[in-house]
Amino acid sequence: MKLLRVGTAGAERPALLDAEGTLRDLSGVAADIDGGLLADDAALERIRAAAEAGELPALDAAGLRIGAPLARIGKIVCIGLNYHDHARETGAEPPAEPVIFFKAPDTVVGPYDTVLVPRGSTRTDWEVELAVVIGRTARYLETDEEALAHVAGYAVAHDVSEREFQMERGGTWDKGKNCETFNPLGPWLVTADEVPDPQALSLRLWVNGELKQDGSTAEQIFPVAEVVRYVSQFMTLYPGDVINTGTPAGVAMGRPEPKPYLRGGDVVELEVSGLGRQRQELKDA
């Protein structure tokens, strides 16, 4: 299923995109799309049954904002330097273990919402990523099979980053990762049954119509199953938590000088195969 949330920011309602591309209202069968729903197999089955029976009313998509597809996110765990080609372009050694940092849930916006360039920023960068959404409480998982069984679905994430704040202002990476609007998510949460192999997805990103990133999750240093299993050794993952799994080559930081960092007025578009497409216009904060 392709689950999404539509409406004005802060007042979104749950919806489903059916196989014919029609937007369907889920508010009669689900209060929202959140960790509680994703952990409830019976509720998800009711949604599937209602969709297959044609019982979900159609929504007029014209002019309807699409928000982030997941409400009340608990935490966003991010994996740094997780693509072989991205490590090469930045001159970094591939890590021996996954690099973990966090983004605050309040960085999440909709897939077509405005992204703000922080005040004083000269190095705002783009990163298309595969987001993994947790559906079952995960702690001390032992196998890849266990790990994938705890995944509810997948989405497109834009891990916007400010490289000076991240690398040169002291401390950890958090300063460059948690600026407002720095994690557009969606348009859909695609349930795991529709993504048989998360290591066979293409990721692309364009800036002002020019292709900048063109990669594949096959290039991940630590595949999705290993990431979920590994993270569960250090923290409990709950339904509705999100893991951003890293970005392929092609970011501004990895390009020759003058590096083409983002500015107000730029337009970024990005997609992951089967998971939908995002578009954001950047404005100065």
Image: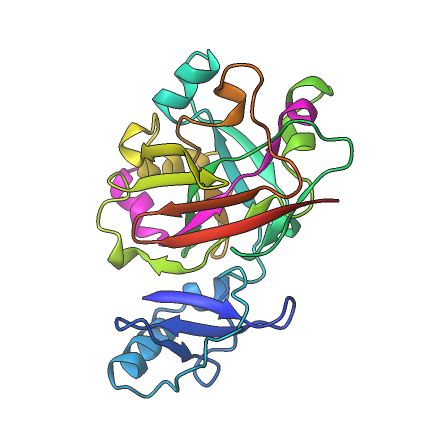
Left or right, 243 with respect to 280, comes to left
Left or right, 25 with respect to 41, comes to right
Where are the magenta residues, as a range? 141-166
Number of numbered tags placed on the structure image: 0
x%, y% of residue 156? Answer: 43, 49
The residue that appears at 43% across and 17% down in the rendered structure is 89
x%, y% of residue 70? Answer: 51, 61
x%, y% of residue 236? Answer: 50, 44
Q: Residue furthest right?
A: 120
Up-down relation of residue 248 to residue 273 (above or below): above
Q: Quadrant of the N terminus?
A: bottom left
The residue that appears at 38% across and 26% down in the rendered structure is 83
Residue 274 showing in the rendered view: yes
Asked whether 116 falls inside the magenta stretch, the response is no
Asked whether 151 falls inside the magenta stretch, the response is yes
Colour basis:
rainbow
The residue that appears at 31% across and 73% down in the rendered structure is 18
Residue 96 showing in the rendered view: no
x%, y% of residue 260? Answer: 56, 26
In this rendered view, identify the residue nearer to me: 267 or 276.
Answer: 267
The residue that appears at 35% across and 29% down in the rendered structure is 222
Q: Quadrant of the C terminus?
A: top right
In this rendered view, identify the residue nearer to me: 216 or 135.
Answer: 216
Left or right, 3 with respect to 158, comes to left
Q: Quadrant of residue 10?
A: bottom right
Up-down relation of residue 155 to residue 89 (above or below): below
Q: Quadrant of residue 118?
A: top right
